[in-house]
Amino acid sequence: MEVQTPDHGTPAQTNITAQTGGTTCAPVIDGNTVQGSLTVINNIYGAQEAPTSSSSSVQAGCSPGASALTKEYITVCKQTHKSELEKTFRSIKEGLSHDGNSMLLNKIYTELYITEGGSGEVNSEHEVRQIETKFRRRPKQETPIKCNDIFKHIPGKDKPIRTVLTRGIAGIGKTVSVQKFILDWIEGKANQDVTFIFPLPFRELNLIKHKKLSLMDLLHLFFPQTKQFRLIDLINCADCTVMFILDGLDECRPPLHLEKNEILSDETESASVDVLLTNLIRGKLLSSSLLWITTRPAAVSQILLQHINLVTEIRGFSDPQKEEYFRKRISDQRLAKEIITHIKSSRSLYIMCHIPVFCWISATVLEEMLSEVEIGEIPRTLTQMFTYFLNFQIKHSSQKCRGNRDTNLHQTRNIILALGKLAFQQLENGNIIFYEDDLRQCGINIKDVSVYSEVCTQIFREESALHLEKVFSFIHLTVQEFLAALYAFFSFISNHRNVLLEQATGCFAFFKKPQMFDFLSCAVDKALKSENEHLNLFLRFLLGFSLESNQTLLQRLLPELRKSSHSKEQIVWYIKKKIRENPSAEKSINLFHCLNELNDHSLVQEVQKYLNRSNNSGFSGAKLSPAQWSALVFVLLNSEEQLDEFILRKYDPSEECLLRLLPVVKASRKAVLGHCSITEEGCVALVKALKSNLSNVSELDLSWNNPGYSGVKELSDLLKEPHCKLEKLHLEMCSITSQCCAVLINSLKSNPSSHLRELDLSWNDPGESGVKELSDLLKNPHCKLEKLHLSDCSITDKGCVALVKALKSNPSTHLKELNLNNNELKDSGAKELSDLLEDPLCKLETLELAVCSITGEGCAALANALKSNPSSQLKELNLNRNYPGDSAVKKLSDLLKDPHCKLQKLGLSECRITGKSGTLVKALKSNRLSQLREFNLKWNKPGNSAVKEVSGLLEDPHCKLEKLNLRTINSNISCIVNTA
């Protein structure tokens, strides 16, 4: 879907609301009123055309007339500009346009799933593979953002947002989002604090890349209506907010030399377009303006991210949005429901529908097919869907063309093959936008190009840009790949040419007795060798064409495309051989999609049997082959179930299993890898996978493994990454020393944008230096840790002092849970913690102090601290296996009586409490406001009287206890109550 180009012959609209079906909008002045008002106001101010580059008296930021502009003049100029933009942006070209009508954007628009955050990392995977792995999973930690809100201030960000980079794969909806953003601004629905929006598509900027002009000249060229304005004054006026939208950075032909280009700050000084754009991005030119850049991921590296305030990512349609689109697109709701049901029945098609353009292609094909009385096989693979789409195109183009039907079909065939050649040649170059020179190089006569665009309205698009030159494109990258594969297949079948070899050698490759297997295996090898995976989808289509059933669908268009008699089993065998040979499961995934296109599911079915048979017993005794491991990855990644939690032990608790299933781990939100004998090698490989910007893992449990120093170092490097999504990291019993701990903590200290909320280092040996590093981290105002577990880490009272001082010195600390079980804190450590609990700014909600050698003195100090601080947030206190003594039990009883006490869980197991435990129960009974839900008093000596008190307490209707454990060391007294 693309933005409709301006129809400059269309009269000015008199009312935007009436045209778009909007409701409450800002008033829009019609063209005549605007023009009249501008004339009057310009006469009053003596305004002429905005200064050109020759007007040397006007310098940037100091326009003498800027302060003299009235609000009335600004409003009239704004409405004039809106009125012109509205002609361009109200409608959208979608599908056939021979009826002369485009669809109103507001009628068809479906909200897209956009997330805040992202990185500049370039992913080499094919964009469709990114859809199949990342885009169908919505990690918990992602922050959705509405398109109209991308320039709004984000809480916690120091600087206002000036420059936004929005990334997204081809066809995911970047340009349509820009169009909707502008239309909502025109209609007064959003962003009314912006005075002027100037959209500058790169595909049009390419046409003037060799020209020298000023920013004023550029704006006058793209927006002729601004010649009437005092534009230099307007863009420098303090009351005006200007926004530039640079759409399609990936389509920019010349590279942007952000650091090398000369500095330019004068809007009237001429320079190349490259210099103008780089100075806009760097903020040297019009530093007060807002800037929005959209791009495919592969081009992100052209922008240095230090110039970007916010990165967002368009993720296409979520599952509910897919259904919403089909219901909006298809008026017959019964038919819409039938289409949705069919799309859901094919996993590959359903995943692809995250791409809005593919939704439209599917709707076009299925609406036509399911509306007919007699229908053929409904498409279930990508090759089938695109082939039906091509046939649908041919059918409608022949209906609208006059003359001999066979002649029209012959012409259509020639056109499609010529476009296939263009698609094939440009695929290797990575171009999705073409100009007249590109077409000439492929032997397409420019004089006939309008015929190409007219005949193939749904495949090939011709657009006018600035009245200078034509711009051409296929409606989507997948259509280009489909036609490229069709051209390659036709060339081999009809002319005995292998264009894949020709492209590699530069020589024609003819065969007297062509073997289909040789041709297809050559394509498989070439796709596997491709570093950027640009031939992955091309290969799927090519293999799909080798099926006789799909060749039958092409017979009408290409009658000379005689059916090949090759054995499908031979190429299936070859693909399976490549799967066995390939150590990378990720490289093999596309080969499984290829097998799907060939209707071979044998490997997948083998693994499915293992899955059904294993249940919870795992695969440890199955001894899967490399091919079966790859098949397991494919099955898990393409299952209907969301990969919320991956538990390695469910399959095989081994490092080999981890290495085989890394793509699945990467796609999961939570990875539980504990007790799986993972070594340094496995940990390093795991972290390399998690460093990919496709990783969704936010919770990682590596407990009871042996990552070693190099493994921990890799984890530390991961935590330094700005785009690292880890929120929870569990490293219990991982032999982490003081050196490892220092490396780990330093990485968190160096990354102010870290997402880590929970860190578990229990059963390790960080030493005094490690505890010191942890203390320094807790002092850091950027530290976001909420839970810190340091059970059994040989922490002494001295270490406890350092931790407490750090927490007290940082009023912005987020720490809510601190686990110090099994450490030698003693009473001195408990007293330090008591000082912390007395602090009204203390945010601790859970404090674990089991087996810490705390006696009555320390326990009493803790109880007194909580009682003296009515604003305490503490809800859980664990004092199991300490020695409170009778005096401390009295203090704890007083605390439980206090109506301000917020404790919900209290642990006093194995604390040598005698009959005084009855006092604790009485305290609970006397406090009807008590919040206590869990009370652990097991393995004490409460005596019979305490048990009677418990019975009375449980009969009290005000008692909120849900779990009470009073099992005693006396065999004749046992009371375990779970009132929940």
Image: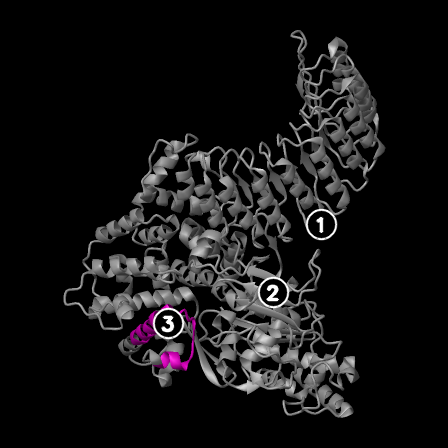
Q: Name the residue under label 3.
A: 426
Label 3's element?
A: helix
- The residues colored magenta run 412-440
* Label 2, label 3: how far apart the Cα atoms are: 32 Å
Judged by its main secondary structure, the magenta piece is helix
Q: How crowded is mark 1: few (under 14 residues within 10 Å), some or many (20 or more)?
A: some
Q: In which quarter of the image is residue 457?
A: bottom left
Return the x and y of residue 859 as percentages of the image width and height. Answer: 77, 25
In the picture of the structure, the residue carrying the numbered disc 1 is 781
The residues bearing labels 2 and 1 have C-alpha atoms spaced at a distance of 22 Å
Residue 821 highlighted magenta (yes or no): no
In this rendering, position of residue 183 left or right of residue 597: right
Rendered position, 77 above or below 165: below
Of the image marks 2 and 3, the number of the one nearer the N terminus? 2
Question: Residue 127, image x and y in percent?
Answer: 44, 60
Pointer 1 or 3: first along the chain: 3
The amino acid on which the numbered mark 3 sits, given as a three-letter code, is: Gln
Is residue 639 visible in the rendered image? The answer is no
How many numbered badges does the structure rendering display?
3
Residue on which disc 2 sits = 306
Figure quadrant of residue 530: bottom left
